[in-house]
Image (tube, rainbow, N blue to C red):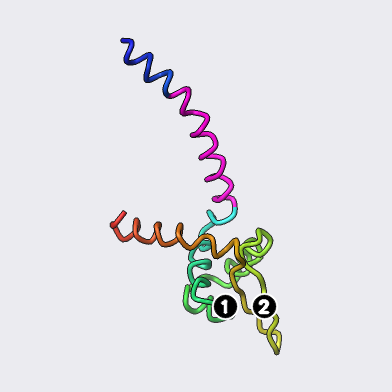
Amino acid sequence: MSGGDGASDGAGVDQGSDDARASGLGAALEVVGARWALLIAERLLDGPQRYGDLQRELGVPTNVLATRLRELEAAGVLRRLPLKHNTRAYALTDRGLALSEAIEALARWGDGEG
């Protein structure tokens, strides 16, 4: 019975760290948790990409791509690059590049390796 009490006390102590972890994870998911967001970031890890290339390579509907790019730009994950002839291209910022390890870990997990 005292083991149950100890586990309960331990859970109470750990809850603070769980709350902090949930808060950080929650904040990250607010930025990259929407469908397609991490796939866009993963594609941009290879370097800047034009809007049309992203749309073709990912197969994402254009309205969804435009929305996700605006959201990621507003969150400081990527930036728009000026190109000629009204063409848009996008590149990751340092904040976006910091997602690299998380994206790679999720990819391994999705492949059944994690």
Q: Name the image quarter holding the C terminus.
A: bottom left
Residue marked by disc 1: 48
**What percent of the width, then of the height, locates residue 99?**
51, 60
Mark sitting earlier along the chain (1/2): 1
Q: Residues within 10 Å of mark 1 (few under 14, many from 20)?
A: some
What element does badge 2 sit on? Answer: strand
Determine the CA span between mark 1 and mark 2: 8 Å
- Residue 98 vertical position relative to residue 18 in the rendered view, above or below: below
Q: Is residue 35 left or right of residue 7?
A: right
**What percent of the width, then of the height, locates residue 94?**
60, 65
Which amino acid type is marked by label 2? Leu
Q: Name the image quarter holding the N terminus.
A: top left
Q: Residues within 10 Å of mark 2 (few under 14, many from 20)?
A: few
What range is drawn magenta here? 11-30
**Mark 1 touches mark 2? (CB < 8 Å):** yes
What element does badge 1 sit on? Answer: loop
Residue marked by disc 2: 81
Residue in the picture at 70% in, 81% down: 82
